[in-house]
Image (cartoon, rainbow, N blue to C red):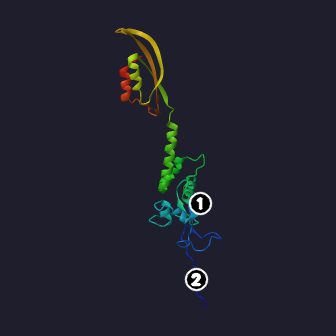
C-alpha cells in the first residue's frame, strides 16, 4: 500500500503557478507573489522582486525582518501609490524605465527611493538633470567692442586677439596727427566675442588677453 504524499504548503501572499506553468519553481512553491499596493493588486514572480537584492521588495518576499499585513487573499499590503508602482515593477522585469507621457518622473523617483532600487534612482535622476540642463540652456550672445588705434599698433593688436575674440571690421578714419615726418593713420577695429549665458546671468570673467587688448587701444 502506497503512503499518500503530503500536500504542499504555501505561505500567505504567494500563489501556485498558473495552469501550464510547470512544477516546482526554484526555491519551492510560491513562484508567484501577490502585492496589494494602495488597493491595486499586482501579480509578479519572486524572481522579479528579488532582482535588486537590497530593495524593500526583495527583503519582503524573502521574509527578512520585514513584517507586512495581508489582505483577505493573502496578498502583501503596501500603503503606496499604485500609479507609480507599475513602472517600478516593469523596471525590475526588464531593466528599462518606461513612462507614460503624462507621468511625472518625480513621482516615480519618490517610489524608487522608498523601495530602495538604486539603479532606477540613478536613471531617473540623470534624466531629470538632462531635462533641467536643456531647459536652462540659453542661446549664446555676441558682445561687440570698438577699438581705436594707430597704424603702427594695428598689427600687434590684431595678433594678440584670442580667447574667443574675433576680428569683424576695420575702418580707416584718416590721419589725426603727424609723427616726425609721417602722418599716422588711425583705425577703428570692431571685434566680437560669443558669451554663453547661464541661469545666473552672463559670465563676467575677464581674461588676460582681453585686458591686454584693452590696454593697446582706446575704448570708444
Q: Quadrant of residue 26?
A: bottom right
- Marks 2 and 1, how far apart in space? 33 Å
Q: Earlier in the sequence, mark 2 or mark 1?
A: 2
Q: Quadrant of residue 204?
A: top left
Question: Which residue lies at the image location 60% right of the left edge and 49% below the top edge?
Answer: 100
The residue positioned farthest toward the bottom in the image shown? 1
Which structural element holds mark 2?
loop
Q: Position of residue 111 (x, y in %)?
A: 51, 53
Front-most of 180 and 211? Answer: 180
Could you tell me which secondary element the residue under label 1 belongs to? Answer: strand
Q: Is residue 3 above or below residue 31?
A: below
The quadrant of the rendering that contains the C terminus is: top left
The image's mark for residue 41 is 1
**Residue at 45% of width from left, 12% of height from top?**
173
Q: Which mark is residue 5?
A: 2
Residue 41 image offset from top left, x and y in percent: 59, 60
Amino acid at each position: 500500500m502506497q503512503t499518500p504524499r503530503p500536500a504542499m504548503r504555501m505561505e500567505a501572499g504567494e500563489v501556485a503557478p498558473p495552469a501550464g506553468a510547470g512544477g516546482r519553481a526554484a526555491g519551492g512553491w510560491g513562484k508567484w507573489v501577490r502585492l496589494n499596493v494602495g488597493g491595486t493588486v499586482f501579480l509578479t514572480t519572486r524572481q522579479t522582486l528579488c532582482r535588486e537584492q537590497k530593495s524593500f521588495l526583495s527583503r519582503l518576499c524573502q521574509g527578512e525582518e520585514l513584517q507586512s499585513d495581508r489582505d483577505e487573499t493573502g496578498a502583501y499590503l503596501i500603503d503606496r501609490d499604485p500609479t507609480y508602482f507599475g513602472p517600478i515593477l516593469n523596471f525590475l522585469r526588464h531593466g528599462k524605465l518606461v513612462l507614460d507621457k503624462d507621468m511625472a518622473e518625480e513621482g516615480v523617483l519618490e517610489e524608487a527611493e522608498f523601495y530602495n532600487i538604486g539603479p532606477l534612482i540613478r536613471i531617473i535622476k540623470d534624466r531629470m538633470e538632462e531635462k533641467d540642463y536643456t531647459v536652462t540652456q540659453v542661446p549664446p550672445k555676441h558682445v561687440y567692442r570698438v577699438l581705436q588705434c594707430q597704424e603702427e599698433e594695428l598689427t600687434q593688436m590684431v595678433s594678440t586677439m584670442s580667447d574667443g575674440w574675433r576680428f569683424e571690421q576695420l575702418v580707416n578714419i584718416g590721419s589725426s596727427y603727424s609723427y616726425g615726418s609721417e602722418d599716422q593713420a588711425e583705425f577703428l577695429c570692431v571685434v566680437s566675442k560669443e558669451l554663453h549665458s547661464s541661469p545666473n546671468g552672463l559670465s563676467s570673467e575677464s581674461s588676460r588677453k582681453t585686458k591686454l587688448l584693452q590696454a593697446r587701444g582706446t575704448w570708444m
